Amino acid sequence: MSATAVVQKATDSKQVVVFRVAEEEFAVGIDSVREIIPMTEITSIPRAPAFVRGILDLRGMVIPIIDLRERFDLGEAGNEDETRITVVEMAGHVVGCIVDDVEEVLTLPAEAIQPPPATAISVDSEYLLGVARHDGRLLILLDLDRVLSEHQQQALSSVAEPMEELEAAAT
């Protein structure tokens, strides 16, 4: 389903979690967010894709951690005091996404959500679900299942699936 179709089908409000990466504000549906935790030590994985910072043991569940600054090519992190890991369901896996700050949970009315401008859509930006106006700001709505390209999803699966198999065997 295209971003335009999703936005046009919206008849109700949408509850989202708003977070900041660099100077940009992004939002994802609250139903995709499992939890938000403070930044913590992450174990590196040798030869992992550049966007995979490493893995984290989250109460017995080992999850891959994705650096959204790296994925969106937004440069190096600045002040890490507000850095958070947003644990989400992405491309069929539970994944942690490093964000600079989680700002708020909002309920956006359907009329505030618009499809992204056609000129902003490229093969590498299919993850844009739409744009929302809220209090004079523009929020970029992300489709978490498309934040990673097909190639990047395969790379993530090579990190995540062995951990999921180990966890299943341990229970």
Image (cartoon, grey):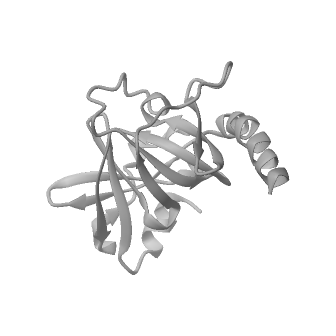
Q: Position of residue 46 (x, y in %)?
A: 67, 19
In this rendering, the answer to whether 107 lies above or below 123 is below
Q: Classify 47 as above or below 63.
A: above
Q: Residue at x 51, y 60 (%)?
A: 34
Residue at 79%, 40% (x, y): give it: 162
Question: Farthest residue in the bottom direction?
Answer: 12
Vertical side of 33 occupied by 14: above or below: below
Q: Quadrant of residue 48?
A: top right
Residue 144 pos. (x, y %): 53, 52
Total label count? 0
Position of residue 91 measured from the top left corner of the image (x, y, whole percent)? 64, 51
Q: Quadrant of the C terminus?
A: bottom right
| Residue found at x 31% / y 31% | 80
Q: Is residue 171 left or right of residue 137?
A: right
Closer to the camera in the image, 119 or 91: 91
Residue sticking out furthest to the top: 47
Q: Position of residue 87 (x, y in %)?
A: 51, 51
The quadrant in which the N terminus is found is bottom right
